[in-house]
Image (spheres, coloured by chain):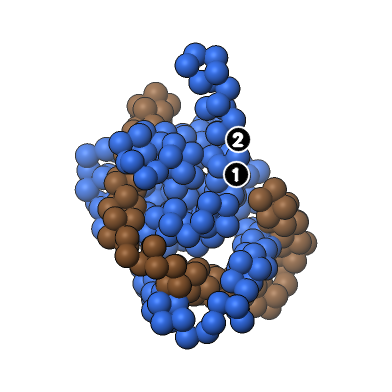
Chain colours: A blue, B brown
Amino acid sequence: MKGSMIILCFFALGVGLGVYEIIPVELLPMHKLSEHILMFLLFVVGVGVGADSASWDLIRSMNYKILLIPVLIAIGSLVGASLMSLVLPNISIEEGAAVGSGLGYYSLSSILITKARGEAIGTIALLSNIIRELATLVFVPFYVKYFGRFSGVASGGATSMDTTLPIISSYSGKEVAVISVFNGIVLTLLVPVLVYFSLSILPIIIDVSTDLFG
Amino acid sequence: MLLLILIMVIGIVVGYFLRNCQKIIHVNNKLTTGSIFLLLFVLGYGVGVDPMIVSNFFELGKDAILLTIAAVAGSVFFVRVIEKKYFL
């Protein structure tokens, strides 16, 4: 929670300085700069996952049923957000799917989406995925009570391995905590793949199916 | 974007071989946090200099909230289905 607040502050500080154009845009090549920082970020995130012995132990002891959980959480998020985009006039289906692909991993998903589709939808992705993390921290007790013990993991998405793990562990139980970590690792790795799928492959699928059935 | 996924995979392999070097992993975690802060600042700056986004901020926020509700509902629903089938 503290982490996401600090991140929000950095974003807000950037917005504030941007509004007054403290640094002229010509002097600060934002797109090149953000691309290089992003490459660096993905590398260090990868190193962090690879170095985490818990993730390798989990993969060794994995059975296919556990893998179903992150896969269905990802599908659910994409389907839910795409359906919602049908009633939102400013959001296309693939943009909705891309926002849903974030799974709470706001830093990475918003940057990827901004790079591919511009600042407006990137900002929506950032806000949406920060809200997802914050709402998980607040509503896990309610979710677990009414929608079952995996609902906290489902809501947390990619954050279920770190920021939302403590609350999930205390309301869903220790055995779910192990699944929660595994789920977070798989979804963290899936986020860039799902964003790519939503923005590059989904439009082709939609085009082909409108040609066939439309 | 495929290049970015490849970079991440290379990172995982490197991380696997460095998994016993606690010092490097510690520095790596600090670098991760630092680059997220820097990146979000740069992202915010890009938003701030764009007058179209600044004037539509609340509209964007409303879309964000609705998409979040739908995405979370979808995830919870799909997981609920397999929980009943496999994990009872």
- Assign the N terminus of chain A to one quadrant of the image: bottom left
Query: Which of the two residues, A194 or A206, is positioned nearer the viewer here?
Result: A206
- Amino acid marked by disc 2: Ile
Front one among A193 and A172 = A193
The residue sitting at 59% across, 71% down in the picture is: A30
Residue B64 visible in rendering: yes
Which amino acid lies under the numbered mark 1 shown in the image of this protein? Answer: Tyr
Circle 2 — which element? helix
Q: What element carries label 1?
A: helix
* Location of residue A213 with respect to A47 vertically, above or below: above
Q: How crowded is mark 2: few (under 14 residues within 10 Å), some or many (20 or more)?
A: few
Q: x, y (%) of residue A24?
A: 54, 82
The quadrant in which residue B35 appears is bottom right
Q: How far apart are marks 2 and 1 (CA)?
A: 7 Å
Instruction: Give left or right: position of A53 versus B74.
Output: right
Judging by the rendered image, the residue that carries numbered circle 1 is A196
Residue positioned 56% across, 42% down in the render: A199
Label disc, if present, on residue B13 of the rendered structure? none
Chain name for mark 1:
A
Q: Residue A102, percent across and down?
A: 47, 50
A50 is higher (above) or lower (below) than A40: above
| Image point (51%, 21%), residue name | A210
Q: Which chain carries label 2?
A: A
| Figure quadrant of residue A166 | bottom left
The 10 Å Cα crowd at callout 1, few under 14, some 14 to 19, many 20 or more, is many
Q: Which of marks 2 and 1 is nearer the N terminus?
A: 1
Residue shown at 48% from the left, 39% from the top: A94
Name the residue beneath numbered marker 2. Answer: A201
The answer to whether residue B38 is above or below residue A35 is: below
Task: Farthest residue to the bottom: give it.
Answer: A22
Query: CB atoms at circles 2 and 1 under 8 Å apart?
Result: yes
